[in-house]
């Protein structure tokens, strides 16, 4: 029986010890009036973002919780994190500025090929439109009404040309964008590698 009592006492002491340690902590923070407050109750939620200190029973600081970053600091930290990720990606893709140059050449060749195909298709659509308009003119010269299907085909060729012109403009825009993007990548990679741009 005495052994059971001893065990219960040890168990109670074990449970009470963390409470005693927690109770020995003080929290120091600054309230809205600029007054430094020392409390055993903790920091009210509205002051946590300003930062606070945790002190032990002897008044020594055992933990410092810094203030939450401002909106500008958060933006700056996010920008730095994004830049670090972008830099890591750049270093994975390329080992030298010349690698960037070769990648740009490949991209430009790909876009030039697309532009060439679109220009060829545009010329073909113009030729077909010209042929169809000649047929329509023959009908008109003969005093006949131009067939509806011929008018539809001419309209289709005109629409196709407009689409192809937009495609060419888009590819040309992508070409300029690629040149600017690869130039920026090359400059940043040179900076990261300590080489000359």
Image (cartoon, rainbow, N blue to C red):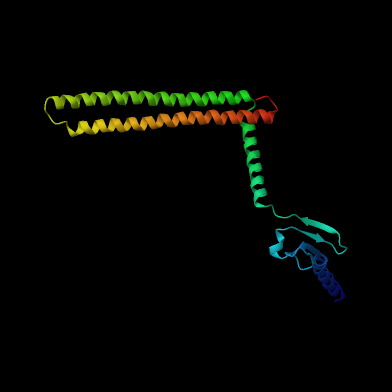
Residue farthest to the bottom, as pictured: 1
Q: Position of residue 124 (x, y in %)?
A: 32, 24
Q: Quadrant of the N terminus?
A: bottom right
Which of the 4 quarters of the picture holds residue 162? top left
Nearest the viewer among 23 and 180 is 180
Quadrant of residue 84 in the image?
top right
Q: Quadrant of residue 76?
A: top right
Q: Nearer the viewer, residue 193 or 33?
A: 33
Q: Residue at x 39, y 32 (%)?
A: 166
Q: Classify 10 as above or below 124.
A: below
Q: Is residue 20 left or right of residue 170?
A: right
Q: Is residue 177 left or right of residue 76?
A: left
Furthest residue in direction front, as rendered: 33
Image position, residue 184 (x, y; %): 60, 31
Q: For the point 26% across and 33% down, which residue is it?
A: 155
The percent coordinates of residue 51 (x first, y second) are: 74, 58
Relative to 108, residue 57 above or below? below
In the picture provided, is 191 more to the left or to the right than 137?
right
Q: Position of residue 68 (x, y in %)?
A: 70, 54
Count of marks overlaid on the render: 0
- What quarter of the picture does the C terminus occupy? top right
Q: Residue at x 46, y 24 (%)?
A: 112
Identify which residue is drawn at 64% across, 39% down: 83
Q: Nearer the viewer, residue 107 or 168?
A: 168
């Amino acid at each position: 029986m005495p052994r059971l009592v001893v065990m219960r006492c040890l168990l109670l002491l074990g449970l009470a010890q963390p409470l005693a340690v927690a109770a020995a902590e003080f929290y120091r923070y600054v309230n809205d009036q600029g007054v430094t407050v020392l409390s055993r109750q903790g920091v009210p939620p509205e002051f946590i973002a300003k930062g606070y200190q945790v002190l032990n029973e002897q008044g020594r600081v055992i933990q410092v919780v810094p203030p939450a970053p401002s909106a500008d600091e958060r933006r700056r930290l996010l920008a730095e994190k994004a830049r670090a990720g972008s830099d890591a990606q750049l270093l994975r893709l390329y080992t030298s500025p010349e690698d960037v140059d070769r990648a740009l050449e490949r991209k430009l060749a790909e876009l030039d090929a697309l532009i060439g195909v679109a220009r060829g298709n545009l010329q073909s659509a113009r030729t077909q439109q010209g042929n169809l308009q000649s047929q329509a003119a023959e009908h008109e010269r003969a005093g006949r009404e131009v067939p509806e299907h011929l008018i539809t085909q001419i309209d289709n060729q005109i629409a196709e040309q407009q689409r192809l012109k937009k495609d060419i403009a888009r590819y040309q825009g992508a070409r300029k964008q690629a040149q600017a993007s690869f130039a920026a990548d090359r400059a940043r990679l040179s900076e990261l590698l300590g080489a000359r741009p």
